[in-house]
């Protein structure tokens, strides 16, 4: 009646693939590149681009606070969702409120 215990080593975790945190940061980077490629060439004298850049700075400040808090409490699923999808979620209301969308 022995039970097989499922131990994982650090090598096993590396073999499983990309960590959720790295995946979230990659998605955030792709969202930034996508949005900036759309709004950078817009012929509105850079107003949309400035809005995108201000929101991007604010987004990364919040992500920095999440990472600073990480020592006391590790990143959970909601933090990773915010990192992955937070930039478009922050940008859309700003563009709608300024009437730029």
Image: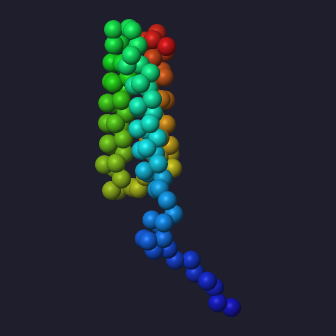
Q: Is residue 76 visible?
A: no
Q: Residue 88 placed where, x, y %?
A: 47, 29
Residue at the spot 46% in from the left edge and 56% down from the top edge = 19
Residue at the spot 37% in from the left edge and 19% down from the top edge = 40
Colour scheme? rainbow
Q: In the rendered image, which quarter contains the N terminus?
A: bottom right
Q: Is residue 96 visible?
A: yes
Q: Nearer the viewer, residue 17 or 98?
A: 17
Residue at the spot 33% in from the left edge and 24% down from the top edge = 54
Q: Is residue 97 left or right of residue 50?
A: right
Q: Residue 18 placed where, x, y %?
A: 47, 56
Q: Residue 55 placed where, x, y %?
A: 37, 26
Q: Is residue 34 above or below residue 3?
A: above
Residue at the spot 41% in from the left edge and 13% down from the top edge = 42
Marker count (numbered): 0
Q: Nearer the viewer, residue 57 or 22?
A: 22
Q: Is residue 38 above or below residue 78?
A: above
Residue 100, image quadrant: top left
Quick one: which residue is furthest to the right in this view? 1
Residue 35, image quadrant: top left
Q: Is residue 85 above or below residue 50?
A: below
């Amino acid at each position: 009646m022995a039970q097989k215990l499922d131990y994982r080593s650090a090598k096993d975790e590396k073999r499983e693939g990309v960590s959720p945190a790295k995946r979230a940061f990659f998605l955030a980077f792709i969202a930034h590149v996508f949005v900036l490629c759309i709004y950078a060439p817009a012929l509105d004298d850079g107003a949309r681009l400035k809005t995108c850049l201000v929101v991007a700075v604010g987004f990364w400040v919040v992500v920095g606070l999440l990472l600073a808090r990480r020592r006391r409490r590790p990143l959970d699923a909601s933090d990773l969702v915010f990192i992955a999808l937070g930039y478009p979620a922050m940008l859309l209301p700003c563009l709608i409120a300024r009437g730029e969308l």
